[in-house]
Image: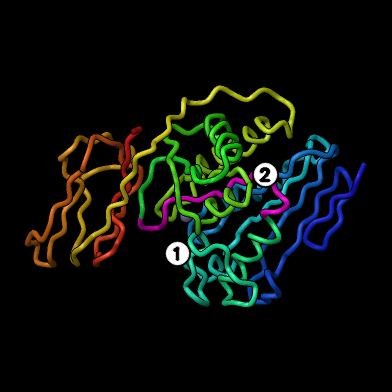
Amino acid sequence: MGMWNILDVSLNRGEKKQLYYSPNGLETHKVPITLICGAKEGKTLGLIAGTHSGEYPAIPATSQFAKNINPQEVTGQIVIIHCLNSRGFWEKSMDAVPDDNMNLNSSFPGNKKGTPGEKIIDFVATKIFPELDFLLDMHSGSKVEKLVPCLFYCSIAEDAVVEATKKAALALNYKYLIIGTSNRSLFGYAALSGVPNLLVERGCFGECKQSDIQAYIKDIIQLMKHLGMISGECEDTITGEFYTNTTYLSSDVNGVWFPKVEAGQQIKKGEILGCVEDIFGNPIKEFYAEYDSVVFYLYCDLPIDKGTFLVAYGSKN
Ligand SMILES: [Zn+2]
């Protein structure tokens, strides 16, 4: 059976290798990667954690998974990027690449001769995406966000890609399956490149709970079963529902933000989402839901300014 060649590395069947990779020769960014070459040839799965460096549970989840998975039991190949924004992680950046403040989830396809962030994005787009049959991009709420576990799927790719994506979404243990249409996001550009994929979200607030780490490991195993990469039946999961109508509310005022809803809360049209006051406690503005919906995630830091994201909510249609 054939060797697997990827990222200038060759692996025999049943082999696991770990390395640091400098995207486009970027010596200041050493991305930790595990490559798993299953005993039998098959689909190639990509797992990416740390696209946003302060979103923690997926980072140890991918490490534990990589340590414990036996390549002899795997059909296919797995590329695991344990922390894409590795420099951001070590420098405690909440999300962006420290060198250029770039969000690795919003500037695809990048540029191999560009800034460090653009070089990392180009590496993902040109060296990783072409290898993959499926991708899981694993996020969390940021250090100033609360969220309910949810996932995003891209709806603007070819029908076959969207269909494979939606089937996988239903196989995983998420209730809220949220439509995404951004073509410059990692998951959007992957889908437009022909790679079915999901952006998943568990945990928030800069925490790294064991329950979220273990839930992420279960997601990976469940996805591998769904893709036929490991033996065993898919476990029964909570029934996912597609949310095709979404609102991302941002502030149009400066002030002190007091959210009035929780992540996962059902809200009615006209219900208050939160209010902004001045530093003396005088009201500046209140924000209300535009329709009956569910709150997916929300901003929880006090100081905000114009353009600060406040609340994401949506409905099934
Ligand atoms: Zn994120």
Residue 1 included in the magenta stretch of the image: no
At label 2, the amino acid type is Phe
Q: Where does residue 179 sit, x and y in percent of width and height?
A: 43, 42
Count neighbours of disc 2 (C-alpha within 10 A) and say few if under 14, some if 14 to 19, many if 20 or more: some
Answer with the quarter of the image where residue 221 lies: top right
At label 1, the amino acid type is Met
> In which quadrant of the rendered image does the C terminus lie?
top left
Front-lying residue, 69 or 173: 173
Estimate the spatial distance between the alpha carbons at disc 1 and disc 2, rounded to whole Å.
24 Å
Q: How is the image coloured?
A: rainbow
Residue 142 included in the magenta stretch of the image: yes
In this rendering, the answer to whether 248 lies above or below 281 is above
- Residue at left 57%, top 42%? 158
Mark 2 sits on what residue? 65
- Residue at left 51%, top 31%? 173
Which mark, by number, is residue 94?
A: 1
- Residue at left 42%, top 56%? 142
Count neighbours of disc 1 (C-alpha within 10 A) and say few if under 14, some if 14 to 19, many if 20 or more: some
